[in-house]
Image (cartoon, grey):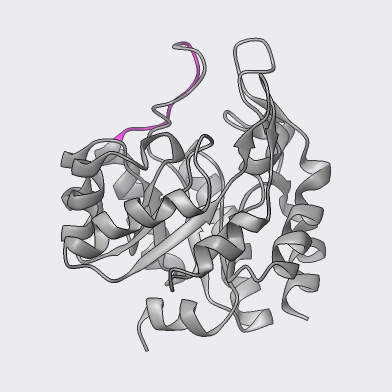
Amino acid sequence: MTLFEQIQRKPFFILGPCVMENQELLYQVAEQVARVGEQYQVPVVFKSSFDKANRTSIHSYRGPGLEKGLEMLQKVKDRFNLPLVTDIHESHQAAVAGQVVDILQIPAFLCRQTDLLVAAAQTGKIVNVKKAQFLSGQDMFYPAQKVVEAENQQVILTERGNMYGYNNLAVDFRNIHDMKSFGYPVCMDCTHSVQRPGGAGGKTGGDRTFVPMMALAAKAFGADGYFMEIHPDPDHALSDGPNMVKLQDLDKVIAPLVS
């Protein structure tokens, strides 16, 4: 059974640290991601970014870059036999990243970029398109259609909240229902949806307290999967720390979603 077929049949989880800080961090988190998949008998995908190209400040840490980052991800796959996802920001990255990862993720800010969507689709990999903060669930028909018309039916759509004034997000869970009507698996980004973009003095803030609630609400609205960034020490993480789930709390968040 392919990964996409598994995702279509069971609740799935995309889990990992926001950005690649070092190899040992990836190993530490990936070990727990693999355990979760085995323990709960659900599809799990390991996620981390080689480049956070949309950081608030030019001085923020971005990651190790494409070549080094893919080497680090390959080591995770070799050690733990986990499927992988990473985000791409430019069309030329799709083919290269597609040689290593199983899912190419399109960042929310870029979900209308036709060339990026088509390049991702042409790799034959699953394409996870995150809904922009300025779009409705109904609007996501068109980004998905760009992937499909590039001859790739393997599409995931991900809800991650909408802008609500400045430096804040709100989630309209009706978007999940609307996106499911297109026939694609719909994922809930439980950690980016609690962000306060640019709201922490040159970097993004947020409140991880609400992550379990976001996940349970999404379950009630029929979400097929759950995206959560996790870290052993999120308060000292190099990106998106306020939003990430503490690694030690992972089971408490996941268990209610698979019961």
- Queried whether the magenta region covers residue 64, the answer comes back as yes
Q: Is residue 102 visible?
A: yes
From the image, give the main secondary structure of the stretch colored magenta.
loop
Q: In front here: 148 or 61?
A: 148
Residue closer to the observer: 241 or 218 = 218
**Relative to 196, does residue 90 appear above or below in the rendering?**
below
Q: Which residue is found at the position 34% from the left and 58% from the top?
A: 144
Q: Residue lying furthest bottom in this view?
A: 1
Which residue shows up at 42% across the image and 59% down it?
A: 76
Vertical placement of 64 versus 187: above or below? above
Question: Which stretch did the figure color magenta?
Answer: 59-65
Q: Is residue 60 above or below residue 181?
A: above
**Which quadrant is the N terminus positioned in?**
bottom left
Q: Quadrant of residue 91?
A: top left
In this image, 208 relative to 204: left or right?
Answer: right
- Residue 163, located in which quarter of the rendered image? top right
Q: Nearer the viewer, residue 112 or 45?
A: 112
